[in-house]
Image: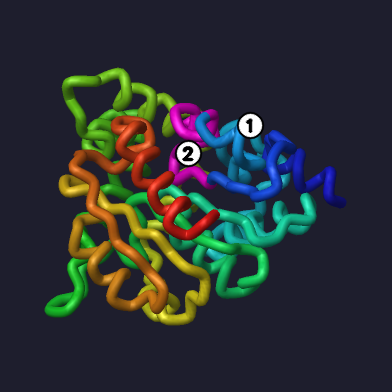
Amino acid sequence: MADNILRRNNVKDSQNGEKTILFAHGFGCDQNMWRFIFPHFENRYRTILFDYVGSGKSDFETYDAHRYAKLDGYAEDVIEICDALDLNDVIFVGHSVSGMIGALASIRRPELFSHLIQLVPSPCYINHPPDYVGGFEREDLDGLFEMMDKNYIGWASFLAPVIMKNPDRPELGEELQESFCSTDPKIARSFAEATFYSDNRADLEKIETPVLIVQVTDDAVAPVSVGKFMNGKIPNSELVLMDASGHCPHMSHPQETLEIMNNYLRSTNT
């Protein structure tokens, strides 16, 4: 059973170090997106990389449309990986939607996690005035999904550079676009719906695990207001603003991302 889970999610385990860091990629990505980050931790920690089912080199045959229609299904993946490797007190590093996926997993099984590091997370991407600015109107997202249905390649080529920003480094946007296009369009659409139509604001107060929220000052997907909202709702949380742009700081600004992560881990003696 454990081997099946590890194959299903294409788990890579360094098997070094007493403490464990588990890296979880965001929507449309895979574990390769952590390549500028995880090598810096391999000498000190046991580092775990994986792909969600339907992403990267996961086993697409195990994809279950019902299970993965909501973020809870992806949180179950995380829990099953931890159990398969007999992990506990894990430092979970989640990019974008994985910030909330890790949070949901920690609510269900708090003993599995010692800390959550959330890079540009969001509990809800849709604006709910007057108290919450998520970044999108519902109609905006409906339009993006309509474009996705009509012309998936066009959707990917439009959205990738908007998400990545940093136009002086177009190769990053091109890599993200290629990652989008490597995923089955039906699976990508389902994951996108689970991501962008989710509303987990009510879950924030249930998070017992200490959380570092990392937001960037210029992000088209998760504005600074989201980070401040989360910081105000999560009991044991800290918010750090990066002097960066784009929704993938671990790729576009890896050194600043590493500095923030290392400072937090030192401050928490982890």
| Residue pointed to by mark 1 | 57
Amino acid type at mark 2: Pro
Q: Secondary structure at mark 2?
A: helix
- The residue depicted at 20 percent of the width and 73 percent of the height is 132
Q: Nearer the viewer, mark 2 or mark 1?
A: 1
Magenta run includes residue 34:
yes
- Which of the 4 quarters of the picture holds residue 142? bottom left
- The residue depicted at 50 percent of the width and 66 percent of the height is 103
| Residue pointed to by mark 2 | 185
Magenta run includes residue 81:
no
Image coordinates of residue 69 in percent, x first then y, are: 54, 60
- Observer-nearest of 145 and 70: 70
Q: Quadrant of the C terminus?
A: bottom right
- The residue depicted at 29 percent of the width and 28 percent of the height is 157
Q: In the figure, is residue 78 to the left or right of 32?
A: right
- Which of the 4 quarters of the picture holds residue 106? bottom right
- Which of the 4 quarters of the picture holds residue 44? top right
Amino acid type at mark 1: Lys
- The residue depicted at 19 percent of the width and 64 percent of the height is 225
Q: Is residue 139 visible?
A: no
Against 255, residue 198 (above or below) is below
Q: In the figure, is residue 15 to the left or right of 202?
A: right
Image coordinates of residue 144 in percent, x first then y, are: 27, 48
Which stretch did the figure color magenta? 24-39
